[in-house]
Image (cartoon, rainbow, N blue to C red):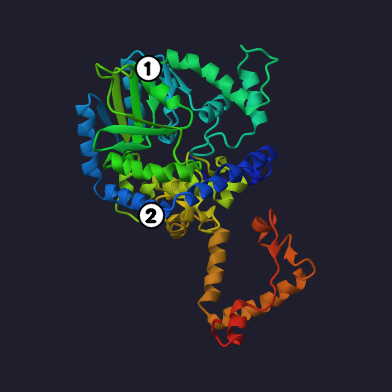
Amino acid sequence: MTSPAFKQNAHDALADKQLQQALGNVRAGFIDKRAQAADRLPEFEALRDSARDIKNHVLAHLDLYLERYETKVREAGGQVHFARDAQEACATIVEICKAQGARTVTKGKSMVSEEIGLNAAIEAAGMEAIETDLGEYIIQLRHEAPSHIIAPAVHLTKEQVESDFRRLHTHLPKDRDLTQAEALLGEARMVLRKRFLEADVGITGANFLVAETGTSIIVTNEGNGDLTQTLPRVHIVIASIEKIVPTLEDAAQILRVLGRSATGQDMSVYTTLSTGPRRPDDVDGPQAYHVVLVDNGRSAMLGTEFEEMLRCIRCGACMNHCPVYHAVGGHAYGWVYPGPMGAVLSPSLLGVDKAGHLPNASTFCGRCESVCPVRIPLPKLMRHWREREYERHLAPATYRYGLGVWAFFARRPALYKLATGVAMPVLNFFGRKKGRFASLPLASGWTDHRDLPAPQGRTFQAQWRERGGRTR
């Protein structure tokens, strides 16, 4: 559960040298690759428009598509379970596992399972839950939450992972070479292989649920999702209700922007479609197939100014391009969803009283909106949450009073002109030697970590008047 501790979390993150080293890989790993992948596809911007329109259409008719999807899953031999909240979703999954006499449950990466606290519920029921995505496996060993929605362990360095493997994989030779990333991957694969074969139940998320066919679709780069859903006797899909798309063709269109936006790939290595349990002529697959559809606050977003957030396809592009995320990482946000998308979604699901501080963690530079594959206006939505936080007097008193002082002057143009006319020369005088301020009263939140440029001359308004109030 998040709390208004973002400021302290961010302060700690900025002082964490290993975290800062790890976050330095985000640019090379995500930003540049996305730009190159988008440039290679001439119709990329048109596909973004199409993806936006598909998602808008679904949200306008979500009840109908959910009914259609449920019908198709049942026709294929599966079962659909609707869960109103996290508690109901966990109880449903635990009940399915217990009915199968499950002792071991393998899991593919699923943010909604993190959202509802599924692992804790499974373990409280006496079963073992094993994360099989490499990043999720690593953070499970460390008892940490994901710091990124597609790269859960992006906050860690290779040396930290090596240390954890040596500490916990004590059955392996101590002198083994783990200096290369490939060796770490190979060791995780070897350890997890046995767990795949032992599992009684496999749980995956879903990138898309296709109403036309009752199909669930996952995209991965490791293949662990395929093993999770084909080897155990039971496959459980857990997904939030907005993951529905009308047809396979619609899913194919959105897939073309998903991989490029997330990791800079034309397509992820594995795109896996599952429709119901094993049929008589199938060579593998589960004997039982369940889908748990989770609401957990999403229905309340429909028809509001935050409905557009339900278009999100969890690519992570917004946080990959966010300067705030680059500086502090995902754990500073205090809950499952970090970055700009978390700053909008978390208050929507948890309430503005618990997460209304997160939209303030933004420069409003607009990079998140510019790269979103479904064109969610994230800065606008964060502004709505800022307004609600302010209206309910949840913002810090210094912020509210400071804004009140600014508003007092802004409503009185002559006084505003006088005050800024005095302030600019004074600041210019004291900052002229270095051209910047490394420390400034009432602005320590900025100057503790970055310089504040000194004013160069008169105010913009004064210069504009001097030029006759016209642009060139």
Using the image as rendered, state which of residue 46 and residue 422 is in the foreground.
46
| Amino acid on which the number 2 mark rests in the picture | Ala
Q: Is residue 325 above or below residue 460?
A: above
| Amino acid on which the number 1 mark rests in the picture | Pro
**Res. 232 mark:** 1
Residue sitting farthest toward the bottom: 468
Circle 2: is it few (<14), some (14-19), or many (20+) Cα within 10 Å? few
> Looking at the image, which residue is at 68% across and 20% down?
177
> Looking at the image, which residue is at 62% across and 13% down?
172
Provide the secondary structure element on which disc 2 rests: helix
Q: Quadrant of residue 432?
A: bottom right
Q: Earlier in the sequence, mark 2 or mark 1?
A: 2
- Residue 357 in sight in this render: no
Q: Quadrant of residue 282?
A: top left
Provide the secondary structure element on which disc 1 rests: loop
Circle 1: is it few (<14), some (14-19), or many (20+) Cα within 10 Å? many
Q: Which residue is mark 2?
A: 46
Location of residue 420 in the rendering, given as x and y in whole percent from the top left corner: 63, 77
Location of residue 225 in the rendering, given as x and y in whole percent from the top left corner: 42, 26
